[in-house]
Image (cartoon, rainbow, N blue to C red):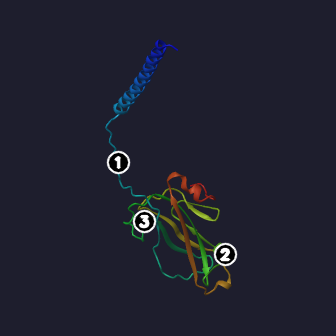
Amino acid sequence: MTSYYKSKLSRIAKRKDLVILLVILSLVILSNIIIFSVAYFYQNKSLTGTIQLGEVDFSIVETEHTKITVVPSSVMQKSIYVGNFRDNDPNNYKTLTSIYFRFYFKAILNDTVNEELTNLISIESKDNLIYDNNFYYFCGELKAGETANICNNIFFDKSINNKYQQQNIKLQFFVDAVQSKNNAYKEVWQDYSTI
């Protein structure tokens, strides 16, 4: 090769190196512009508040505590209430939610549930109750601070026989309550009645 061509190739190589160098330099400058041009200010804030969750609680209140002697076919007046408040205190219902409730009772003889005797006793209430699936259902929502009568009279069937003479019988009431919101009773009481 002649020196003319060698010098020409050398210049082309230098130009090529220069072009590559300029392209690299341009890319570096362009990337710095992009990196530095996306700088921005930003701020983040949060707020925390306290929410008081509701609670389900209730009281079972018996108005008379006297021991009464009954015979078959007797009607005993006995008022029992469910109150949507705590600790039998009608003023203690802050944070309580409205409830639906159901209940049943059992006759207890000699510290044992007696199903035969339980079936010979019935109750009457002033409030609207429905008996279904072995439960009495209170028809409606019991709001915080309210009460509902679950028993006004107790009836002793005429079929109660001599084997129960002079026995002390206890009636025990069992109450289930569930929040009234979001149809919770359908989930909790799968055997529920119409409320």
Q: Indicate left or right for 144 with 158 as reference.
A: left
Q: Above or below — where is 33 with respect to 112? A: above
Q: CA distance from mark 1 to mark 3?
A: 36 Å
> Hey, what amino acid is under mark 2?
Glu
Q: Indicate left or right for 99 with 116 as reference.
A: left
Q: Indicate left or right for 130 with 25 as reference.
A: right
Disc 1 vs disc 3: which is toward the camera?
Answer: 1
The percent position of residue 6, horizontal first and vertical second, equals: 48, 16
Mark 1, residue position: 46
Mark 3, residue position: 85
Mark 1, secondary structure of its residue: loop
> Hey, what amino acid is under mark 1?
Ser
Mark 2, residue position: 115
Give the mark, 1 or 2, whose residue is nearer the N terminus. 1
Q: Is label 1 in contact with label 2 (beta carbons under 8 Å)?
A: no
Q: CA distance from mark 2 to mark 3?
A: 31 Å
Q: Residue furthest bottom?
A: 166
Mark 2, secondary structure of its residue: helix
